[in-house]
DNA sequence: ACATAGGTATGATTTTGGTCATATTTAAAT
DNA sequence: ATTTAAATATGACCAAAATCATACCTATGT
């Protein structure tokens, strides 16, 4: 799918600190893949044996809870590396990764990344930084989950999506999720997510055409109680 | 408080991969401190400028949510390093650290740790591993928060405490928390935590003498619905 | 020993959100 | 184009948990 040393995507993740010769080496052993929305990249409990660099699209990181409900723990987007945690701790995947849109990903085998981690201190420092960032986000989600209402969490999710995916020319969010996805991010029943989105719509905070959602009043969403 | 190169505590964290000469260097610039239960080690938003190595005791990592409720995100125990995340990302603290028991901690200035991270690949690899572990725990807590009932979370908390702190000769947990602390870990109202602990007691799953709690039936706690 | 504050306990009531049931709309497959 | 399945929507009801109120217990300092 092209050469790593010419790929601009690496600017967005820890791979930016690799040298040209390392990138050329990686080009030689990486594999690229196109995925359709809904395809599974890897499952909880699976050996990943490398990291995925997301060239295009979005992916849901989910976990099935014992009651059979799926929780979306995080969205991984274009430019992110996927599978860092498992690589570093040398463990099987803790989460399942499912394409939330059509995607293009490159897979870099574990030993290549481990080699670079052992040689290039900037690279390992950058990976430390990106894991630190993930950790902070996760800590903040824990607090939100524990202390905020479903309505507040849904409002925050909408604002997060606007912030991170932007809007198209008509003001609709550049990411399409089902109501069930919203419920699985927020950690609520699908019916509750639907009801609350309807309510936001009635109150004029958002508008919706099918799955496409437009945020009309971000300020009011921030103040939802 | 003694010399790092002779301190056994470092075996429990990333500092184990430092060489003798580095430990001697660190001994020369570290400071040690005794803290009483309830004392604040650092607050959310504060510049930490180093890491703390916990020699003795337990510390709560908390965050105040906008509704004024405190959430305990994690307990940091003897042997752990505190402040890794802020150090690596060069940001202010995301959480507040409060002594949950009397403590002994050593403070190592930022530049020393950064120096070792830049020199010693084993050290940075071990720090990556410990952050990966924290990240996995946090992801799992998110799922629990979103999908499990308060009762289940409280039962899990009790089992977690038994697992990580052990029991004294009479079977009581080796960690003393208030009912409010339990509520702040689980993410519920103090009254709810009290009620559920009373219920567990009535059902014989635990017994309690004041703040001391004994787990009588771990198997049943695992099966709480 | 007594006052005080913080912590524990429990009841009554309300709110939030989950579950179940049932339409209706939309998208996908052939 | 028609069928079928999946997604959305809404009502009715129920369960979990928050809130408010009050009482009691237990350390702590004076």
Image: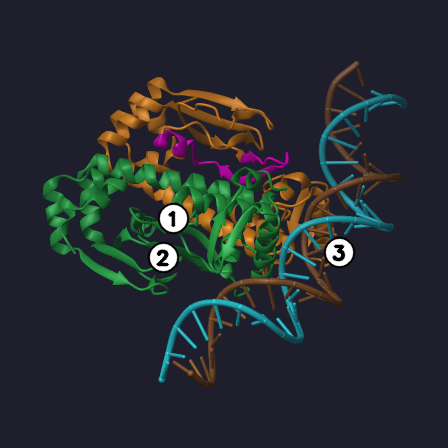
Chain colours: A green, B orange, C cyan, D brown
What residue is shown with label 2?
A93
Q: Chain of mark 1?
A: A
Magenta residue span: B61-89
Q: Looking at the image, is mark 2 or mark 3 nearer the viewer?
A: 2
Q: Picture quarter containing residue D25? A: top right
The x and y percentages for residue B19 are: 26, 31
Q: In the rendered image, which quarter contains the C terminus of chain B? A: bottom right
Q: Is residue B167 visible?
A: no
Q: CA distance from mark 2 to mark 3?
A: 40 Å
What residue is shown with label 1?
A168
Q: Are marks 2 and 1 on the same chain?
A: yes
The x and y percentages for residue B149 are: 62, 56
Q: CA distance from mark 2 to mark 1?
A: 34 Å
Dot 1 crowding, Cα within 10 Å, few <14, some 14–19, many 20+: few
Q: Looking at the image, is mark 3 or mark 1 nearer the viewer?
A: 1
Q: Are marks 3 and 1 on the same chain?
A: no
Position of A101 with respect to A116 (left or right) is right
Q: Chain of mark 2?
A: A
């Amino acid at each position: 799918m092209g050469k790593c040393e010419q790929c601009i995507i690496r600017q967005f993740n820890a791979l930016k600190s690799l040298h040209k010769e390392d990138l050329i080496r990686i080009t030689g052993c990486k594999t690229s893949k196109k995925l359709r929305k809904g395809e599974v990249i890897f499952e909880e409990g699976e050996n990943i044996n490398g990291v995925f660099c997301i060239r295009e699209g979005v992916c849901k990181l989910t976990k099935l809870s014992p009651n059979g409900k799926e929780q979306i723990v995080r969205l991984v987007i274009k430019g992110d590396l996927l599978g860092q945690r498992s690589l570093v701790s040398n463990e099987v995947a803790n989460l399942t990764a499912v394409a939330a849109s059509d995607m293009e990903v490159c897979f870099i085998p574990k030993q290549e990344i481990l080699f670079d981690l052992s040689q290039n201190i900037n690279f390992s420092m950058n990976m430390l930084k990106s894991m630190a960032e993930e950790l902070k986000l996760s800590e903040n989600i824990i607090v939100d989950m524990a202390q905020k209402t479903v309505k507040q969490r849904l409002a925050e999710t909408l604002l997060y999506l606007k912030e991170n995916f932007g809007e198209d020319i008509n003001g609709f969010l550049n990411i399409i999720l089902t109501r069930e996805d919203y419920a699985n991010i927020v950690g609520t029943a699908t019916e509750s997510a639907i009801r609350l989105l309807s309510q936001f719509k009635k109150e004029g905070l958002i508008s919706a055409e099918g799955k496409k959602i437009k945020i009309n009043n971000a300020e009011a969403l921030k103040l939802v109680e």
